[in-house]
Image (cartoon, grey):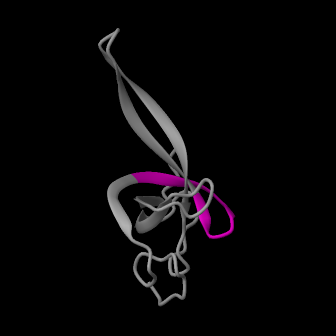
Amino acid sequence: MKECEDPNCPFHGHLKVRNFKMVGMVVSTKMRHTATVRVDYVKRVPKYERLEKRRSKIHAHVPYCMHVEEGDIVEISSCRKLSKTVSFVVTKILKKGGNEE
């Protein structure tokens, strides 16, 4: 990672992250300094005593020092609200370009 002047960077800026972390795949990077991350999870259905797969899309801020692309596996952490829809920040790139559908 290189130095950045981003005030919303958890490493070089003043943004504090919270303990809630998730791992997901980047599905879109069309917004400026924001990525859409798809998070897959499992939910229990008590009536049928089964588990079901679910997924959700979360908008996360991408600091200037990180370069993510579609298909990357990233770790996102919760932080204060940065805009109307963004309340997460990318903290780590776990795998580059792993496009698995």
Residue displayed at 42% across by 75% down: 10
Residue displayed at 47% across by 88% down: 2
* 75 or 85: nearer the viewer: 85
Q: Is 25 contained in the magenta span?
A: yes
Could you say which quadrant of the image residue 36 lies in? bottom right
Q: Relative to 44, is 48 above or below?
A: above
| Image location (x, y in percent) of residue 72 | 50, 60
Overall secondary structure of the magenta section = strand
How many numbered badges does the structure rendering display? 0
Residue displayed at 42% across by 29% down: 53
**Residue 85 as seen in the image, left or right of residue 96:** right
| Image location (x, y in percent) of residue 40 | 44, 40
**Residue 87 as seen in the image, left or right of residue 94:** right
* 97 or 51: nearer the viewer: 51
* 80 or 75: nearer the viewer: 80
Residue range of the region highlighted in magenta in the rendering: 23-35
Q: Residue furthest top?
A: 47
Could you say which quadrant of the image residue 29 lies in? bottom right
Q: Is 42 contained in the magenta span?
A: no
| Image location (x, y in percent) of residue 67 | 54, 74
Image quarter (top left, top right, bottom left or bottom right) of the N terminus: bottom left
* 56 or 14: nearer the viewer: 14
**Residue 66 as seen in the image, left or right of residue 42:** right
